Image (cartoon, rainbow, N blue to C red):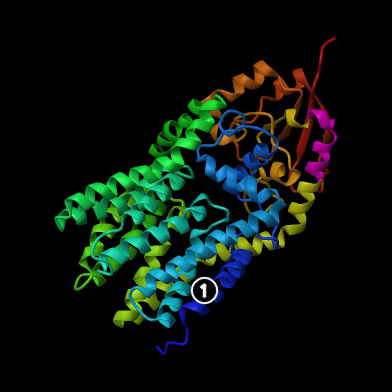
Amino acid sequence: MKNLINDKRAFLFLPFIALVFILVYSPSTSPLYLYEGFDSCTFKTIGIGILEGKIPYTDLFDHKGPILFWLNALGLLCGRVGLFFLEVIFFSAMLVCAYRIARLYTNGSKAFAASLLTLIPTIDFITEGNQCETYMLPFIALSLYMALRYTTGRMPYHPLRYSFFYGVAFAIIFFIRPNDAVSHVGAIMFGLFLLMLRKREYRNAIANAAVFVVGSLVVAIPILLYFYTIGSLGDMLHGMIGYNLQYSSESGLNEGSIGILLIPVIIYGGTIFLSRRNDKDSWFILIPSLIFTLILIGKRDYYHYLLPVLPVFCLFAAKCLSAGYTKVIAGISILFAIFSFRQHVLLVRCASQHGEIAELYRQSKDLILRVPESERTQIWNHNLYKLSSDKSPHVYSMTGIWSNAGVSPANRVFIPFHRNRFGEEATLAANKPKWLLYTDASTDPNSLDEQFLRDNYKVVATTADNCIAKVVLYQLIEND
C-alpha cells in the first residue's frame, strides 16, 4: 500500500471522521435524532440534577462513577449539542491514539486504514451512544500506546512518567466505571510490572508501581474528599462499589453473552498470534487484559462492554495489514459489518419515529410545566422506564422525558429497574409526594397500585390519545 497518509494528514482527517461517525451512529446525542437511549438518558438526568444543585447517589441514584455524571452535566450546559460535541472530542482522541498505536507497527497509510477499520465494530459496540465506555477510550488507548512503546524496544527502561499517567487514567476510569479500570489500564500496569520483573529491572518495577499509585491518588483523593465534605461518601461508595458488585454478579450465561465473550477472544487471540515472533513482550499486556476483560463482561450481553477493546482491534488490524493478512482483517471486518445490521435498523426506526417521539416529549413537557415552577423539582418519577406500546415498532426509554424537559425527578431511585433493591414502593407510600408523573405503557413490572392512586391522587392532565404513550400527571389529594 502506497504511503499516501502522513501523521499530519491523519491528525487532520480523524477528528472530522469522528464527528461524522458520532453524528450518524450516536442517536442519543446526535442532533439528527431525538432518540433517548436508556443508559444515556439516565446519565443525562443525573447531569441535569447536578446543574440543579443535586448530589449524585444521595439525591439521584445510579451505580456508575461521578466523573461520568459530571461530564454529562458539563455537556448539557450547552444542551444536547454540547453533549454531542463532548462525545466527538473523546471519540476523536481515541481514534488519534489508535492511529498512533498502529503507527508503531506500520506506515501512515496502513495505520490510517487500521483506524478506519476500527469504526466498523464500533457501529455495533456504541449501541445508543453516550455510553460510559466512550469517555474512557482515550485513556485506555493512550495507555496502551505508551506501554507498547516500551514492549517494542523503543526505550531501554519504562519511564516513570508513563506509570504516573497510567495511575491517573486508572483513577479516572475507576470513577467512570470501576470494573473497566481493572480490566484495561490496571491489566496493562500489572503486565508491565511482570515484564520488568522478568527483565530483572527490580528497582524500576517497584518505582513504576509506586508512581502508578501516586498518579491514582492524585485523582482519587480530591473526589473522595469532595463527597466526604458534602456527607455523601458512603452513598457514593455503596453505589459505585457495593451495589455495582451486586449488579455485576446477577444474570446468567445465554447465547448473547457467549457470543460477546468470543469477540475479545478473537481480537486479542489474533493479536497475540501475530505477535508470536518478534513482539512477544506485548503478551505481558495483552494476556492479562484479555483475562480481565472476559471477567468484566462475565454473563452480560451488552455490546457496549466491548468498546474498550477498540484500541486492541486497531492494533490487530495494523498487524494484519503489516504482515500481509489482508484477507483475514477484511473478512472479520465484513462479519462486523453484517452484525451491525441491527444497529442500522435501530437508526432507521429512530429517524422514522422522530415526529412521534418529539410529540411525546412535547406533551410530557407540557404536563411538567403545569406544575408551579417552585414545585417542579418535587415531581416523582414512576414507571417512566421503557415504553412498550402497540403504536411503537420498538422499545425505547421513556426516562428521556426528564432529560428532554430539562428537569430531574424528585425521587432518588428514579429508575424502576433499581427500585426493588431500595424499597422505593414503601418510600412512595410513606412520603406521598405532591406530584406524580406516571404511565401504564411501560415494561416496568412494578406498576403502581391503581387503588393507591385512586385513594391518594387526582388526575391533573394526560397526554392526548394520539400520543404513542399515555403519560399522566397526578396531584396529591390533600385533606383539610
Residue sitting at 44 percent across and 66 percent down?
Answer: 97
Residue, far bottom: 2
* Residue 96 horizontal/vertical position (percent): 48, 68
Residue 376 appears in the picture as rendered: yes
Residue 339 appears in the picture as rendered: no
Judge left or right: residue 419 versus residue 250. Answer: right
Q: Residues within 10 Å of mark 1 (few under 14, many from 20)?
A: some
Q: Which residue is mark 1?
A: 11
Q: How many marks?
A: 1
Q: Quadrant of the image for the N terminus?
A: bottom left
Which is more toward the observer, 78 or 219?
A: 219
| Residue 366 falls inside the magenta stretch | yes
* Secondary structure mostly taken by the magenta-highlighted segment of the chain: helix
Please report the bounds of the magenta region as a residue range. Answer: 363-375
Q: Quadrant of the image for the C terminus?
A: top right
Query: Compared to 65, does 117 lie above or below?
Result: below
User: Label 1 is placed on what type of residue?
Assistant: Phe
* Residue 353 horizontal/vertical position (percent): 72, 58
| Residue 323 falls inside the magenta stretch | no
Q: Secondary structure at mark 1?
A: helix
Which is more toward the observer, 231 or 267?
A: 231
* Residue 223 horizontal/vertical position (percent): 50, 36
Residue sitting at 64 percent across and 48 percent down?
Answer: 74
Quarter of image, res 281: bottom left
